[in-house]
Structure formats: structure tokens, C-alpha cells
């Protein structure tokens, strides 16, 4: 049960992602070229940060790569899922934005969490 209490934020955020991508023909009209890629990047960066937060400490390169692989697969499945939703389509470019966002979120959160842990250890 303790694992679920730690993992509920990334699981809930994944549910939000699936909910948002399940709406047919989104009414949001982007007037700036590539703005949707910024949204994909941001949403998956948040997911990456939430996952980094619950990885075992010390977070190793292997654990970060495994987390990125899982998020990348989730992003791919979400893109395939969108291909079944009226008014939506799967895009390799959206998937790339998802993956890059996840990598940035994972690494940024890992760095910040590691820095906070070091500072905490240095205090008397």
C-alpha cells in the first residue's frame, strides 16, 4: 500500500493525459505553429518529474533510463490510442515531443532532488 501512496501522483497524471487525449476534435485552436508540441512537451515533462520523485534513492542512470523507456511506451500507446478518437490523429512528432519532455522532466527533477538531498545531508 505504501508503494501506491507514492505512485498515485504519476498514475493520476497519466489518467489526466489519457482523459485529455480521449476528447474528440479538441476545440483548442493553436494559432502558433508548433504550439501543440509545447503542450505535449510540458505535459510529459510534468509526468517525468513526478516519476523521478518516486524512483528509489539513489536514482541511477539505469533507473532513469527505465523510467524514460516506460514513459516513452506510454506516450506511444497514447498516440496510437488517439488514432482511434474522431478528430484526432497519431503523430510521430507529438510522440517525440512527449519523449523529449519526459527526458527533460526526469533529468531536471533528478538534479533538483539530488541537490536537495545533498544539502540536507550537509546540515548538522
Image: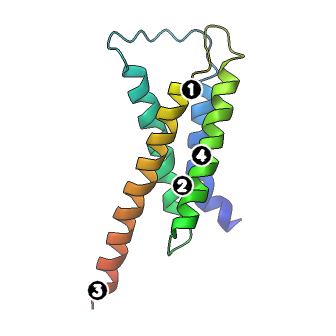
Q: Which residue has dot 4 on it?
A: 71
Mark positioned earlier in the residue sequence (2 or 3):
2
Give the distance between the C-alpha atoms of the residues marked 1 and 3, in whole angstroms. Answer: 45 Å
Q: Nearer the viewer, mark 1 or mark 3?
A: 1
Give the distance between the C-alpha atoms of the residues marked 2 and 1, in whole angstroms. Answer: 23 Å
The secondary element bearing badge 1 is classed as: helix
Residue 82 occupies which quadrant of the picture?
top right
Q: Residues within 10 Å of mark 4 (few under 14, many from 20)?
A: many
Q: Residue furthest bottom?
A: 124
x, y (%) of residue 44? 49, 40
The secondary element bearing badge 3 is classed as: helix
Q: Are marks 2 and 4 in contact (CB under 8 Å)?
A: yes
Residue 122: image tag? 3
x, y (%) of residue 81? 70, 25
Q: Residues within 10 Å of mark 1 (few under 14, many from 20)?
A: few
Give the distance between the C-alpha atoms of the residues marked 2 and 3, in whole angstroms. Answer: 26 Å
Compared with 8, 31 (above or below) is: above
Q: Residues within 10 Å of mark 2 (few under 14, many from 20)?
A: many
Display colour scheme:
rainbow
Give the distance between the C-alpha atoms of the residues marked 4 and 1, in whole angstroms. Answer: 15 Å
Compared with 117, 54 (above or below) is: above
Mark positioned earlier in the residue sequence (2 or 4):
2
Amino acid at each position: 500500500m505504501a508503494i501506491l501512496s507514492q505512485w498515485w501522483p504519476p498514475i493520476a497524471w497519466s489518467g489526466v493525459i489519457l482523459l485529455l487525449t480521449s476528447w474528440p476534435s479538441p476545440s483548442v485552436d493553436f494559432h502558433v505553429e508548433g504550439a501543440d508540441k509545447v503542450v505535449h512537451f510540458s505535459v510529459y515533462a510534468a509526468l517525468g518529474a513526478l516519476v523521478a520523485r518516486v524512483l528509489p534513492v539513489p536514482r541511477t542512470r539505469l533507473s532513469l533510463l527505465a523510467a524514460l523507456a516506460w514513459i516513452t511506451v506510454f506516450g506511444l500507446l497514447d498516440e496510437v490510442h488517439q488514432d482511434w478518437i474522431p478528430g484526432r490523429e497519431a503523430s510521430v512528432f507529438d510522440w517525440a515531443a512527449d519523449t523529449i519532455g519526459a527526458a527533460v522532466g526526469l533529468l531536471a527533477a533528478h538534479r533538483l532532488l539530488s541537490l536537495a538531498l545533498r544539502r540536507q545531508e550537509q546540515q548538522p
